């Protein structure tokens, strides 16, 4: 398909990148971006680009990636609990200032011949275009007014985005215990000598700290939408004083939020197609809206290049991207639940906590993690098993470790005694249904958590077992197919279960 006129709603990374790729693929096409904000008035701090995303950008548009990489700042990742630190090496990860990212994308879009129009609000139905690309964000007016079947699921935890005026050496996850509960930061450096400093907490801690009242006061006072919650910033500045090294926290429309997961039944309606956050979101702990939007842009332009008409192109675009997006959304959903329940795990040694973090969504298993960060895994195994693990098959060694639980000793981690069976078939282990199962386990001599054989169900059982183990202290075992042994092994080292029951069952 060779459209004559394309309108892009939204001048964020996805919209700008789609506009450039469209113009490069169709030089004779008129491509115009409509952005309601202004070039120098951007929301946010830094953006992270992982190695996989960089490879896709390299294949689609090496010139743009080159300028982003030059602008960005490479770093590793650390988990810090008190004075203990575990480091994961990831030299492909780069942090880029959102202002720099947008400047690069604006420059490259204009270089390709895209027209940029700022400070104007447009809707899809008022534009004279063969094709409208709606990249107008998580609060997309296009999605809400069109026949896309959009729906939004709101998370339980609370978070706010802020920044600080120095560059950390590495990305950092750091929980801090306060009199109100645990606050945890996800922080990472980016270009310009600054760092993003995202902070989150559970609702109980948020309320005990009085932030429900300060948030309500901001709303009641009619505070301008672009103002920040200075009360929270000043409080958290003290909470994270050690990590901030005396530097202040910087706000940019910084307010407490609950994450909104966007899903749509369809991504196209007539000549309009959704892209990026307008179509889908994934929790920030595992996905990036920038990554998803720019990868959407690549797939959309490829589909338009190959298809004879818009309807066919949109179907191909969605057919390619939806499976990848939904897979990432499921990983992100599990990661979001893990972070929302994070305070219960801070008693783990930092290396085991890092293993728990890396395996939280089932995306990274122990053997794979050991290849990239052997020092972290070696320390975690020593903490788990009480002695260094020999070279060789890690899973066999983990399963062979003795367990002492109260006054009972088990020769290995598969020696499961007769326990009360706890049937689990639910989506959210921290739901009211999960609460009821934990209550059932309380006061028993131990539970065997069982359920469907499929891998997603097993991962959920491990999460529910972790709740039982941490909240009740009873002996906890998880039943799972022998084919999924690696997931069960990761669950043991991460403290999600005490024992595992391997059964020969098709997955």
Image (cartoon, rainbow, N blue to C red):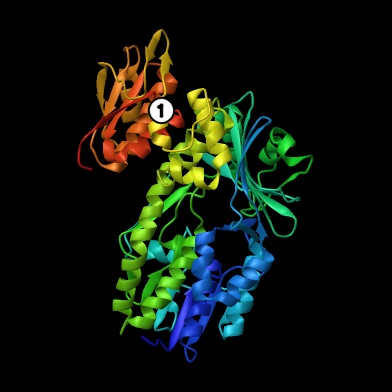
Q: Is residue 358 left or right of residue 72?
A: left
Residue drawn at x 42%, y 77% is: 301
Residue drawn at x 69%, y 30% is: 83
Picture coordinates of residue 468, whole percent (x, y): 38, 23
Instruction: Name the quadrant of the C terminus.
Output: top left
Q: In this view, does 464 lie to the left or right of 100?
A: left
Q: In this view, does 408 lie above or below 8?
A: above
Q: Is residue 486 left or right of residue 159?
A: left
Q: In this view, does 298 lie above or below 373?
A: below
* Residue bearing mark 1: 466
Instruction: Identify the residue at the far top of this view.
Output: 407
Pick the front one: 329 or 400: 400
Q: In this view, does 382 lie above or below 330?
A: above
Q: Is mark 1 on a helix, strand or loop?
A: helix
Q: Is residue 150 above or below residue 202?
A: below
Pick the front one: 144 or 478: 478
Displayed quadrant of residue 425: top left
Look at the image and tell me whether residue 139 can be seen: yes
Pick the front one: 40 or 466: 466
Instruction: Identify the residue at the far right of this view.
Output: 246
Pick the front one: 375 or 128: 375
Picture coordinates of residue 298, whole percent (x, y): 45, 72
């Amino acid at each position: 398909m060779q459209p004559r006129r394309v309108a892009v709603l939204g001048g964020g990374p996805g919209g700008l990148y789609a506009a450039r790729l469209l113009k490069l693929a169709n030089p004779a096409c008129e491509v115009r971006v409509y952005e309601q904000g202004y070039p120098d008035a951007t929301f946010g701090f830094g953006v992270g680009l992982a190695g996989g995303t960089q490879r896709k950008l390299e294949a689609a548009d090496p010139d743009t990636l080159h300028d982003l990489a030059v602008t960005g700042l490479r770093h590793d990742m650390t988990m810090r609990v008190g004075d203990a630190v575990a480091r994961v090496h990831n030299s492909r990860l780069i942090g880029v200032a959102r202002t720099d990212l947008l400047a690069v994308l604006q420059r490259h879009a204009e270089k390709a011949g895209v027209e940029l129009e700022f400070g104007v609000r447009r809707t899809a139905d008022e534009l004279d275009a063969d094709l409208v690309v709606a990249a107008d964000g998580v609060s997309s007016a296009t999605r809400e007014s069109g026949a896309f079947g959009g729906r939004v699921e709101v998370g339980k935890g609370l978070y706010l985005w802020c920044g600080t005026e120095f560059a950390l050496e590495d990305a950092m996850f750091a929980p801090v215990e306060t009199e109100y509960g645990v606050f945890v930061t996800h922080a990472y450096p980016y270009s310009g000598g600054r760092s993003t400093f995202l902070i989150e907490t559970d609702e109980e801690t948020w309320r005990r700290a009085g932030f429900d009242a300060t948030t309500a006061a901001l709303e009641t006072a009619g505070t301008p939408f672009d103002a920040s919650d200075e009360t929270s910033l000043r409080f958290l500045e003290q909470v994270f004083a050690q990590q901030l090294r005396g530097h202040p926290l910087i706000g940019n429309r910084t307010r407490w939020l609950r994450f909104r997961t966007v899903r749509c039944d369809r991504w196209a309606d007539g000549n309009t197609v959704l892209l990026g956050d307008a179509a889908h979101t994934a929790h920030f702990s595992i996905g990036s809206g920038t990554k998803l939007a720019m990868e959407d842009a690549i797939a959309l332009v490829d589909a338009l290049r190959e298809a004879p008409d818009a309807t066919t192109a949109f179907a191909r675009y969605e057919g390619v991207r939806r499976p990848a997006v939904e897979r990432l959304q499921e990983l992100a959903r599990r990661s979001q639940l893990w972070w929302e329940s994070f305070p219960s795990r801070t008693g783990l040694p930092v290396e085991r906590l890092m293993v728990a973090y890396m395996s939280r969504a089932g995306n990274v298993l122990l053997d794979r993690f050991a290849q990239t960060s052997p020092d972290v895994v070696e320390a975690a195994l020593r903490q788990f098993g009480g002695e260094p693990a020999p070279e060789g098959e890690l899973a066999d060694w983990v399963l062979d470790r003795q367990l002492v639980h109260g006054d009972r000793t088990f020769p290995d981690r598969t020696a499961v005694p007769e326990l009360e069976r706890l049937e689990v078939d639910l989506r959210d282990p921290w739901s009211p249904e999960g609460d009821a199962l934990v209550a059932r386990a309380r006061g028993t001599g131990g539970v065997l958590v069982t359920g469907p054989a499929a891998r997603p169900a097993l991962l959920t059982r491990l999460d529910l077992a972790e709740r039982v183990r941490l909240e009740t202290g009873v002996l906890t075992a998880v039943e799972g197919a022998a084919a999924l042994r690696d997931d069960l092994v990761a669950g043991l080292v991460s403290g999600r279960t005490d024992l595992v029951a391997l059964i020969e069952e098709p997955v």
